[in-house]
Amino acid sequence: MGFLTIAFPGLASERPSKPQVTINVYNDAGVSEQVLAQAEQEATRIFRQAGVDNVWVECHVSKPALNPDSECQPPGGAAHLALRIVHWSSNLRDTIFGTAFLSAGGEGTQSDVFYDSVEKLHKDWHASLSRVLGHVMAHEIGHLLLGTNAHSPMGIMRPNWQSQELRSIGLGTLLFTSEQARSMQAKLFSLRARK
């Protein structure tokens, strides 16, 4: 089981609030509203533990945003990302749960989650579908916020999840490391300071 990241060739001492990221969600796989809402709650909990707030925006491809003020505008910068839930990727193993699209410089705003792989893991390990999906969503968003080489030997950014990680998902303890949390916060605060 693993994840794939595709790469193409100083903070202020006082912060008024937590950094925030907005995530446009495209549910191309047709995940039920209940499962998706619970998965978003789980990912929100994981990010809050890392000191990052997030806003989920449900977007629909069939109804493109014609209004320039719409929340479903294409993402721009690390504070506004897109996460697409698709059934599967035809050229990847079913043990790959998602991918983040990063430039050669490690920047990116779009990621995919492969729902068929998430469902298979849920069935094979009798794990909560919404919890598994929420953790995979957080992992892929983590790639977008942490950049290239974001995988780590422990925590939610492990490249391969085994039985220990699945137990941690069930207990709600598969989280970002403190170093990853600081890195995501720094990136988001830096973006906010540039506005």
Image (tube, rainbow, N blue to C red):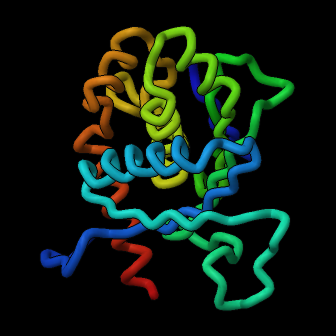
Quadrant in the picture for the N terminus: top right
Q: Is residue 127 left or right of residue 29?
A: left
Against 173, residue 16 (above or below) is below
Quadrant in the picture for the C terminus: bottom left
Total marks shown come to 0
Instruction: Judge whether residue 136 can be spotted in this image.
Output: yes
Residue appearing at x 55%, y 9% in the figure: 124
Q: Is residue 154 left or right of residue 9?
A: left
**Front residue (pair 85, 80):** 85
Residue 192 at x, y percent in the picture: 40, 79
Residue 153 at x, y percent in the picture: 37, 22
Q: Is residue 82 left or right of residue 127?
A: right
Residue appearing at x 47%, y 40% in the figure: 134
**Front residue (pair 142, 73):** 73
Against 187, residue 101 (above or below) is above
Against 135, residue 143 (above or below) is below
**Front residue (pair 127, 174):** 127
Residue appearing at x 81%, y 74% in the figure: 64
Instruction: Pick out the residue farthest to the left.
Output: 13
**Front residue (pair 84, 195):** 84
Residue 170 at x, y percent in the picture: 32, 23
Residue 51 at x, y percent in the picture: 25, 57
Against 153, residue 83 (above or below) is below
Instruction: Judge whether residue 102 can be spotted in this image.
Output: no
